Image (tube, rainbow, N blue to C red):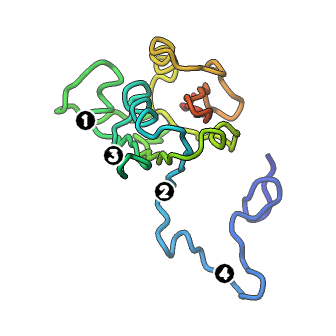
Amino acid sequence: MTADRDGGPLGLPRRTHAALGIGVASNLGTRHQFHGIQPVLPVSDVTRAARYFRDVLGFELDFIAGEPPSYARVRHVPSAFDADVQGGRHDLARPAAIVPDGHGQGDAVYIRLWQCNARETRQWRGEIVIHVGYDIDGLHAAYLKRGVDVIEPPTSQPWGLREFAIREPDGHVLRFCGYL
């Protein structure tokens, strides 16, 4: 990719310096402390989807709401314990491991599950990319053992990531990737 004078890829500046009719625009993300995204996936059965994300994909159930349940959130929050689990070690006294290239342990991952009409859930609406700190191939192998629908095997990409993709039961694509 090529960079312009402001360092942006493909000739696009990294920041917008002026908004139409507003004058100079401030960096709203910083000003309002944007700190993450939480994708919402439409699912045909929120209880089944929450169980799948917990029991098969390894997320933790954060909450489930409604009577009957119609909305849930699953999460994974990295910890020092997670850093040691990658090598089969569970020594909380050890310092946390660092991901190669100084990327750290990563951010928390939250995914919201919203129950809706089953016919609407099968339309492809994009995918979610989840960065993995350690052993992308081991995660792939674990998912295969659990019967996960792997639609793309682990592949080293020219942009410096090794990644694979799965399709969960409602048809959403989740792409797991780790730094080479």
Q: Earlier in the sequence, mark 1 or mark 4?
A: 4
**107 w.r.t. 159: above or below:** below
Task: Give the residue at x 45% y 40%.
Answer: 46
Which quadrant would residue 169 be assigned to in this image? Answer: top right
| Left or right relative to 43: residue 18 | right
Where does label 4 land, which residue? 25
Q: Quadrant of the C terminus?
A: top right
| Mark 1–mark 4 CB contact (< 8 Å) | no
Q: Earlier in the sequence, mark 2 or mark 4?
A: 4
- Dot 4 amino acid type: Ala
Q: CA distance from mark 3 to mark 1?
A: 27 Å
**122 w.r.t. 136: above or below:** below
Disc number lying in front (2 or 4)? 2
Q: Earlier in the sequence, mark 3 or mark 4?
A: 4
Disc number lying in front (2 or 3)? 3
Where does label 1 land, which residue? 95
> Whole-percent x and y of residue 174?
58, 34
- Badge 3: how crowded within 10 Å, few (<14), some, or many (20+)? some
> Whole-percent x and y of residue 44?
54, 38
Task: Give the residue at x 59% y 44%.
Answer: 117
